[in-house]
C-alpha cells in the first residue's frame, strides 16, 4: 500500500542504533514514522537522490548537524616543503544551497565517495570562486598548455 508523505518533521537513530527513524505526516494518514534498517540505508538514500535528480537539476545533499560534524585531518602540504601544495582531481562534485537556513553555498568534492570533502562558502565567497574558476578556464582554453590539448 502506497502512502503519501507531505512533510518530513524529524529524523533520529533508534536506541539500538540499527534503524534510522524519519518522522513525518501526510494528508490522509496523519503522523507517521518510517524505520529504515541500517543495512539498507545507503540504498534508500541512493533511491531518494536518484528520484530528486529527475525532479531538480541541483544535487541534493544531506547535512549533518553542527554537533555531529566531523572535521577531517588533512595535510595539504606535499612533504615538508611549506611552498608546495598537493592537488587532487575529484571524480564527482556537487554544488547546492544550504537548506538549513544558514545562508551558505555548499561545495562537495567526490560526492558520496569514500574520500568526500565538503566546503561551506558565503554567497560572496562562492561568487569569487565561481568567477575565478571561469576566468582560469577561459584563459586555459585561449592559450595551449604544454602537454595538454585544448578542450
Image (cartoon, rainbow, N blue to C red):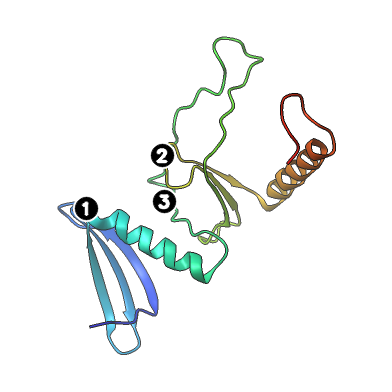
Query: What's the residue at 39%, 64% (across, down)?
Result: 48
Relative height, residue 150 to residue 50 (above, below): above
Q: Nearer the viewer, residue 84 or 149?
A: 149
Question: Looking at the rendering, in which quadrant would you find the N terminus?
Answer: bottom left
Query: What's the residue at 79%, 39% (across, down)?
Result: 141
Q: How crowded is mark 2: few (under 14 residues within 10 Å), some or many (20 or more)?
A: few
Please give the residue where the numbered disc 3 appears in the rendered image.
64
Q: Is the residue under label 2 in contact with that under label 3 (CB below 8 Å)?
A: yes
Relative height, residue 70 to residue 5 (above, below): above
Query: What's the residue at 73%, 33% (across, down)?
Result: 149
Give the mark, 3 or 1, whose residue is nearer the N terminus.
1
Please give the residue where the numbered disc 2 appears in the rendered image.
70
Residue 49 spot, x, y in % from top left: 43, 61
Give the mark, 3 or 2, whose residue is nearer the N terminus.
3
Q: Nearer the viewer, residue 80 or 133?
A: 133
Please give the residue where the numbered disc 1 appears in the rendered image.
39
Question: Spatial distance from mark 3 to mark 1, Cα to Cα?
Answer: 19 Å
Q: Which of marks 1 and 2 is in front?
A: 1
Q: Nearer the viewer, residue 86 or 139?
A: 139
Q: Nearer the viewer, mark 3 or mark 1?
A: 1
Task: State the SS at label 2.
Answer: loop
The answer to whether 96 appears left or right of 126 in the picture is left
Amino acid at each position: 500500500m502506497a502512502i503519501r508523505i507531505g512533510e518530513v518533521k524529524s529524523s533520529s537513530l533508534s536506541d539500538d542504533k540499527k534503524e534510522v527513524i524519519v518522522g513525518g505526516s501526510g494528508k490522509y494518514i496523519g503522523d507517521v514514522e518510517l524505520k529504515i534498517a541500517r543495512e539498507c540505508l545507503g540504498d534508500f538514500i541512493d533511491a531518494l537522490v536518484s528520484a530528486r535528480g529527475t525532479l531538480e537539476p541541483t544535487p541534493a545533499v544531506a547535512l549533518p548537524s553542527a554537533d555531529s560534524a566531523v572535521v577531517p585531518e588533512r595535510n595539504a602540504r606535499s612533504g615538508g616543503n611549506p611552498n608546495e601544495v598537493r592537488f587532487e582531481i575529484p571524480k564527482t562534485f556537487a554544488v547546492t544551497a544550504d537548506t538549513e537556513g544558514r545562508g551558505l553555498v555548499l561545495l562537495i568534492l567526490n560526492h558520496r565517495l569514500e574520500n568526500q570533502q565538503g566546503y561551506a562558502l558565503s554567497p560572496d565567497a562562492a561568487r569569487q570562486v565561481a568567477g575565478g574558476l571561469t576566468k582560469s578556464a577561459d584563459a586555459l582554453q585561449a592559450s595551449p598548455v604544454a602537454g595538454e590539448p585544448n578542450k
